[in-house]
Image (cartoon, rainbow, N blue to C red):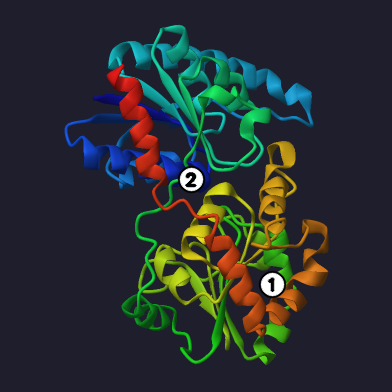
C-alpha cells in the first residue's frame, strides 16, 4: 500500500496525521507512507522525528485582512500545485489523506484531478475552507463532531473522532516520575497551562500578570509558554533535564515547550488551554477538567465553536480571550478547589472521547483502497 498524508502547520494537524500513519504501519508493515507539508513549518521537523519522509510545498496561507498581501501567496499556490502534481505522478499512491490546513489543498487538488481517491480528516466542529473545497471529490470524510452535514455531503461522513498521541496513558508510575521531572510537590493540586506549540499571548499575559497571586496560593502550575512568548521575557537556556527551556518559581515551572506532555498530563488536576481540536481530543481521552480560552485569531473562529460544543454538554468552562486577563486566574483558583465541579467536568468530557479514532480512520482507508 502506498499512501500520501498531507496537511500541517500546527501540532493540531501533525499529531493526528502521525497517529494515522502509525496505525497504518501497525496494520500494514510494508506500507510506504509519504508526508507532504508546508515548507518552513513545524511538520518539516516533527514528521522526520517520527520516522517518516516528508516533502515541503512552497504554499502559504491567505491573509484575510490585507488582501494585497495575497499576491505572492497566489504565486506560491501555483508553484505548489505544479510540485504537487509531480509528487503524485512520481509516487502513484493508492490513496491520499488530507488532515486539514492550507498545506493539504494543492496536494489533494492534484490527486483528485489525476483520478486518485482521497480521504479527508476534519478535526474541528466548524469545517475549514480547504476541506470544504475538497469535500465534493473526496471518497470519505472522517469527522470528530456531530452535525457536520451542514458542511459536507452527509453520505460521505463517518464519525471517527480525532486521533491523538499514543503515549497518553496515566499511571501511578508516570505520576511519580512527573513530580520528580518537574520538581513539584505531590501533595499540592496542579494546574497545567498550555497555549499550543507556538504559544498564546493572552494566556501568557494572564499568567504573568498573576504571578504574585499564584506564588501566594497553595496550588502549583506547569506553564508552557510556546515559542512566541517574547511578551513575558526570555526563558533562560539550560533546561529541564537538558531538554526543555525552563524557569522555576516557588509554585510554578515555566517552559517554552513540554517535550514530555504525557508526564504533564499525568499530574494535571485541571488544564487551561486554547481550544484546538487536537488538544480537546486529548483532554477527552484523558478525562481532564479544562478551562478553554479560544483563540480569536483562527480561520472561521473555529476554536470558539469547538469550545462552545463542549460547554453546551457541561464538558468544559469557556472564558473568552478578551476576558482572560481579568477572569482566568480567579476562575482557575475557584475551580481547582471544587472537587465536585472538577469531577462533573471530568465525567462529561470523558463521554466525548473516541479512543479508537485512528483505527476507525484506517478501517475507512482499507475499504477505499480495496475497491
Callout 1: helix, strand or loop? helix
Residue 196 or residue 190, whichever sits in front: 190
Percent coordinates x, y for residue 198 in the rendering: 57, 52
Question: Which one is in front, 221 or 229?
Answer: 221
Asked where in the image residue 64 lies, by quadrant, the reply is top right
Q: Residue at x 56, y 68 (%)?
A: 347
- The quarter of the rendered structure image containing the N terminus is top left
Q: How many marks?
A: 2
> Above or below — where is 285 with respect to 222?
above
**Which residue carries the number 2 mark?**
162
Q: Residue at x 42, y 53 (%)?
A: 355
Give the structural element (helix, strand or loop) at label 2: loop
The residue at the point 40 percent across, 16 percent down is: 117
- Distance between mark 1 and mark 2 Cα atoms: 29 Å
Judging depth in this view, the residue of 342 and 277 nearest the camera is: 342
Instruction: Name the image quarter holding the C terminus.
Output: top left
Give the image location of residue 27, x and y in percent. 23, 39
Which residue in the rendered view is the most extreme toward the top? 114
Is any atom of residue 239 visible in this view? no
Q: Residue at x 55, y 33 (%)?
A: 101
104 on left or right of 17: right
Q: Earlier in the sequence, mark 1 or mark 2?
A: 2
Residue behind mark 1: 207
Where is residue 81 drawn, in percent x and y?
50, 14
Near mark 2 (Cα within 10 A), the count class, few <14, some 14-19 or many ≥20, is many
In this picture, residue 173 sits left or right of residue 301 = left
Amino acid at each position: 500500500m502506498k499512501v500520501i498524508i498531507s496537511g500541517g502547520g500546527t501540532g493540531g494537524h501533525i499529531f493526528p496525521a502521525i497517529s494515522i500513519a502509525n496505525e497504518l504501519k501497525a496494520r500494514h508493515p510494508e506500507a510506504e507512507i509519504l508526508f507532504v507539508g508546508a515548507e518552513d513549518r513545524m511538520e518539516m521537523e516533527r514528521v522526520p522525528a517520527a520516522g517518516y519522509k516528508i516533502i515541503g510545498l512552497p504554499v502559504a496561507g491567505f491573509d484575510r485582512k490585507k488582501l494585497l498581501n495575497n499576491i505572492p501567496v497566489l504565486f506560491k499556490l501555483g508553484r505548489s500545485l505544479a510540485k504537487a502534481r509531480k509528487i503524485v505522478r512520481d509516487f502513484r499512491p493508492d490513496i491520499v489523506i488530507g488532515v486539514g490546513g492550507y498545506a493539504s489543498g494543492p496536494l489533494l487538488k492534484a490527486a483528485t484531478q489525476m483520478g486518485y481517491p482521497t480521504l479527508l480528516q476534519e478535526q474541528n466542529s466548524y469545517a475549514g475552507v480547504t476541506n470544504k473545497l475538497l469535500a465534493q471529490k473526496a471518497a470519505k470524510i472522517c469527522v470528530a463532531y456531530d452535525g457536520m452535514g451542514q458542511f459536507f455531503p452527509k453520505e460521505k461522513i463517518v464519525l471517527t473522532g480525532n486521533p491523538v498521541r499514543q503515549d497518553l496513558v496515566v499511571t501511578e508510575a508516570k505520576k511519580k516520575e512527573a513530580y520528580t521531572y518537574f520538581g513539584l510537590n505531590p501533595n499540592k493540586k496542579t494546574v497545567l497551562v498550555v497555549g499550543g506549540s507556538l504559544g498564546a499571548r493572552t494566556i501568557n499575559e494572564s499568567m504573568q500578570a498573576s504571578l504574585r497571586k499564584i506564588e501566594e496560593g497553595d496550588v502549583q502550575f506547569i506553564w508552557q509558554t510556546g515559542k512566541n512568548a517574547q511578551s513575558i521575557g526570555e526563558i533562560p537556556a539550560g533546561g529541564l533535564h537538558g531538554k526543555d527551556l525552563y524557569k522555576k518559581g516557588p509554585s510554578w515551572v515555566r517552559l517554552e515547550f513540554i517535550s514530555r506532555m504525557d508526564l504533564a498530563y499525568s499530574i494535571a488536576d485541571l488544564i487551561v488551554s486554547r481550544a484546538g481540536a487536537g488538544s480537546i481530543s486529548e483532554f477527552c481521552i484523558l478525562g481532564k477538567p479544562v478551562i478553554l480560552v479560544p483563540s480569536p485569531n483562527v480561520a472561521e473562529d473555529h476554536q470558539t465553536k469547538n469550545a462552545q460544543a463542549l460547554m453546551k454538554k457541561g464538558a468544559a468552562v469557556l472564558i473568552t480571550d478578551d476576558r482572560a486577563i481579568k477572569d482566568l486566574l480567579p476562575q482557575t483558583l475557584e475551580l481547582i478547589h471544587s472537587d465536585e465541579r472538577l469531577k462533573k467536568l471530568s465525567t462529561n468530557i470523558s463521554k466525548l472521547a473516541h479512543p479508537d479514532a485512528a483505527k476507525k480512520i484506517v478501517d475507512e482507508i482499507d475499504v477505499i483502497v480495496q475497491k
